[in-house]
Amino acid sequence: MREILHPTPIRPARKPSGPVVIWNLIRRCNLTCKHCYTTSADIDFPGELTTAEIFSVMDDLKTFKVPVLILSGGEPLLHPDIFAISKRAKDMGFYVALSSNGTLINKQNIKEIAEIDYQYIGISLDGMEQTHDLFRKKQGSFAESVKGIKLCRDHNIKAGIRFTLTQDNVDDFPAMLKLMDEQDIDKFYLSHLNYGGRGNKNRKDDAAFQMTRNVMKQLFEACLKWEKQGVEREIVTGNNDADAVYFLHWVRKNFPHQARHIQTKLEQWGGNASGVNVANIDNLGNVHPDTFWWHYHLGNVKERPFSEIWQDISDPLMTGLKQSPRPLKGRCQTCAHQKICNGNTRVRAQQVYDDAWAEDPGCYLTPEEIKHNCRDT
Ligand code: SF4
C-alpha cells in the first residue's frame, strides 16, 4: 500500500540469509482452541527438547544464518525457561518474536517480558468477546488477551493481533478493525484457515471464497486509510499467497497507473516460501517445511543439525518446494501469477487431493483472474 502512495525504485530482490524459524518450544497450552494446528492441551507432553538441547540447536541456527526466531507453542509462556531462552536468543542477535495467546501476560510478569526486548509479540484473537470466548472454550479469555496487548503497548513492546478467519468469526471482522483503532494496535495478522492439526477437522467451516474476498477488500481499504492518515501499522496476511494476486487486481482497479510497479514488487517478494525461507521445529525437535506440515517429518534436531536437515533435498517434498518454479499441476500450473504466488499452500493440496503438487484448493481467485498478468495486457 505504501508502494502505491510512495513508490520506491525497483532494486534487485534481497535474498534472506536463512529461513525464518517458527519454533514450537512447548505443546502445553492453557487453552484448547478450535482451529489449533498443534492440538495442544494443558498437560506436559513427553519427549520435548530440554533447555540445553534448545540452546545447542540455537547455536546451529546462528551458524546457519537464521535471522528470525518466532517462539511459539502451545503457549510459550508456559515454558519454565522461556525468559532464559528468549534472552539467549536476543543476546545472540536473532530477531525474536513471541506468539502467545496473551492470557498469561499480566502485571506480575510484564516487566520481565519488557526486559527481554522482544521485537514483536503476536497475540491471537478469534473475534470479538463472545466469538473469541466460544472458540477458546474459556469465558473471559478475550478480556485477558486484550489486557495482554494493552500491557505490551504500555511497556513499549510492539504487539499485534493474530486472527484466523473462518465462517464463524467473519461477522466480527469489521469490529476487529475498529479494535485496531480503539486500542491503537501496531500490527494485524490475518491468517487463512489451513488444514493442519485441529483445523483439519473443521475444514468445512472454512470461510467461503466470497467471504474471503470481502474480508480482503475490507482489509485493503483499512490499510489504505491508515496509510493515508500516516498511521504506522503493519498488515500481514498468511496461509494464502493468492492474497497477493487478489491485491494486484485491487490495485489494477483502484490505482491502474501503479499496477505494473506493484506487480514487479510482488514478484520480487516471491510468494509462498515454505521449505525455503520459512521453517518449523516442533516441540519434539522434528523439522517441518512450515507449521502446517506436522504430519511430515524432515528429520529431528536431536539426531541431525537443523542446517543439515534443511539443505537435504533427497526428501521429495523438499526437492519440490525448493525447485523454482515448483512442479505444480492443475490451475496453479497454468496460472499467470505463479511468480507472485508460487503455487500457494501445498499442504492444502496434499490434504485434499493427496498430492502435494495438485492445485491449491484454497485459491479463491476466478479463472479470469488467473489468466493474465499486467505484462500480458
Ligand atoms: S491458481 Fe495457484 S498459483 Fe495461481 S493464484 Fe491461485 S493458488 Fe496461486
Image (cartoon, rainbow, N blue to C red):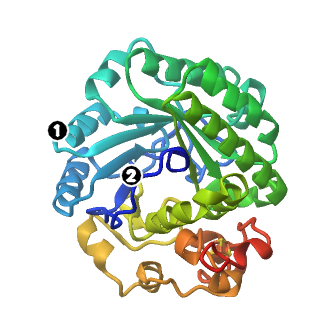
User: Mark number for residue 23?
Assistant: 2
Q: Can residue 239 be seen in this view?
A: no
User: As shown in the figure, which amino acid type bears the numbered disc 1?
Assistant: Asp
**For numbered disc 2, what is the local secondary structure?**
strand
Quarter of the image where ligand 1 sits: bottom right
In this image, 296 relative to 309: left or right?
right
Residue 197 visible? The answer is yes
Mark with earlier residue (2, 1): 2
User: How far from the left and from the top, in percent, is residue 156?
Assistant: 37, 20
In this orientation, which residue lies closer to the viewer: 246 or 196? Answer: 246
Q: How crowded is mark 1: few (under 14 residues within 10 Å), some or many (20 or more)?
A: few
Q: How many marks?
A: 2
Look at the numbered discs 2 and 1 and tell me whether their residues touch, using CB distance below 8 Å: no
Q: What residue is drawn where x is 60% and y is 83%?
A: 357
Looking at the rendered structure, the kind of residue marked 2 is Trp
Q: Which residue is drawn at 25% across and 74% down?
A: 308
Determine whether 293 is above or below 327 in the image.
above
> Against 202, is 309 above or below?
below
